[in-house]
Amino acid sequence: MKNIENLFQEVKKTKINFIVVTGGVCSSIGKGVLISSIGVLLKNSGYSVTVIKWDPYLNVDPGTMSPLVHGEVFVTQDGAETDLDLGHYERMLDLTLNRASSVSSGQIFQEILEHERKGLFLGADIQLVPHVVEAIIRRLLNFALTEKMDFVLIEVGGTVGDIEAEIFLEAIHQIRYYLGNERMMHCHLSYVPYLAWVDELKTKPTQHSVMALKKTGIKPDSLFLRLDNKVGQEHIKKLSIRLGIPENMIFQVPTCKPTYSLFMELQSQDLDCVLQNYFGQQNPERASLHQWQNLVTNIKKEKSSITIGLVAKYIGGNDPYMSVIEAIKAAAWHCLHEVNIEIISGEKIEQKNKDELDALHACDGLIIPGGFGKRGVEGKIQAITWAREQGVPTLGICLGMQTMIIEFARSLAGLNDASSSEFDPKTSNPVIDLLDEQKEVVQCGGTMRLGSYPCTIKEGTLAFKAYGKKHIYERHRHRYEFNNRYRELFEKIGVAFSGIFEQKNLVEIVELKNHPFMVGCQFHPEFLSRPLKPHPLFVAFIEAAIQAIGSRYFNKKSVYISKKYQLE
């Protein structure tokens, strides 16, 4: 390990600057969106940027957490299971991040204890300060030196005042001490509540939040007020006086729809210039945001709409499917349509819930997203049966592809007990089975087939038409895969295996012939979708949903699967 002071000296020789964002009053106020917005302004002013997220939780990564607890798990190209905020960074900044961009307290403590067991501390009494804090700093500096960008943006997860975040705040304090104010800017995002019963905005929580920061030895350089509607200058002046932050360093972050409007809103407050001025740029470049402005203009235009059903397992918020929802929106906007996304419970479909079935039957297209475990799977299969028979375009992702395979096996191949060995280890027809490489795996965290793998696409298929090329790379997160023992049987019933990982002969994409669009992929295409560059599979799916609307309403009871594909 390099001496920490030597690392600081190496960083000082570069032109790397650091911007850190903390959050106050409560969680879920949009630190990830703010830091992405700062990155967009800098990147579009001509600077290179990268991002790192510090999460105070003790899990090594969010891979073993329920999506209902911590939202979706975003998978990086190199196979790291990370916080959903990395999805914000990649989408908005069009970056390809790696595992070094995601740091948790669990990782830091694991590293410290492993080093202690190896005797690397030479008999020292290991403490939070200096050992744990220096481990955090060392990771950041090594990250900065490796990435070699103009700006490193740092998001500190959680809320100021949380006991578990204190080691990260101490790290910020020490980094600033060694590098100086001119190399690090601290932005504090704080929620400003509105009390409807007295018709007043309250700044007191923000004042207390900044006071809590000052107790750690940190005085923020700028303050960002998270609110529903912008406030008057009198509130800005009041906070400036109370907190000692110049008025021109206090910015408002109102709720913006769409979110991308925030880039233009912050530019209207001169944030792009203020950031550059802080780091010594006397003639700042204004950020060129015309692409984002065009996108926002397109989104706000009145246009036809379609309804896409998301047959979900994790119900209770959009966070479990954040990237899927953003990918659907991006594709719909690209196709000049508004989209209504209906979250449909697979469990309630299974229970024949009338409201849920009515919602399903009103959809113009279905997406069957990923997930783990048996709960809700039969409902997903029933939804696929309906979509197959009614010619409703459907995209299955990971578990969604696997449930498609099970449905085809039962309905078209006559394998009535077909299932996945994940759900029924004793099934006589495991059309989905555990990958060979997973059969000796015992640990849960970080042991799946993770990250980017190549896929070869067969010409003349819907997948090839969507991608327009033969070779692609996509990101994965799974343990189970199509069982190749059934490949010949499936081909006989009209299933095309249009994407293959040739090195191990693994099925990556399946599609059903004689159907407008019934495509399943073992990978997660949503992780590569961008607002300005929607993913081709999602675009093809939305296009198919738009095209199928008219014909479907005139053929409510039609079955698109030809009799010749039925086995005797």
Image (cartoon, grey):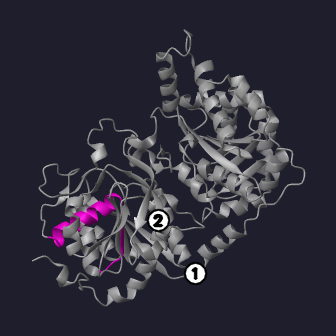
Considering depth in this image, is 497 or 311 the residue closer to the camera?
497
Eye-nearest disc, 2 or 1: 2
Tell me the amino acid under the disc marked 1. Answer: Glu
Residue 386 in the image, given as x and y percentages of width and height: 25, 74
**Residue under circle 1?**
302
- Is label 2 in contact with label 1 (beta carbons under 8 Å)? no
Q: Secondary structure at mark 1?
A: loop
> For the point 41% across and 53% down, which residue is it?
476
**Residue under circle 2?**
471
Determine if the magenta segment contains residue 395.
yes
Furthest toward the top, the residue is 123
Residue 5 in the image, given as x and y percentages of width and height: 72, 23
Tell me the amino acid under the disc marked 2. Answer: His
- Up/down of 449 relative to 229, above or below: above
Q: Secondary structure at mark 2?
A: strand
Q: Is residue 224 visible?
A: yes
Q: Quadrant of residue 418?
A: bottom left
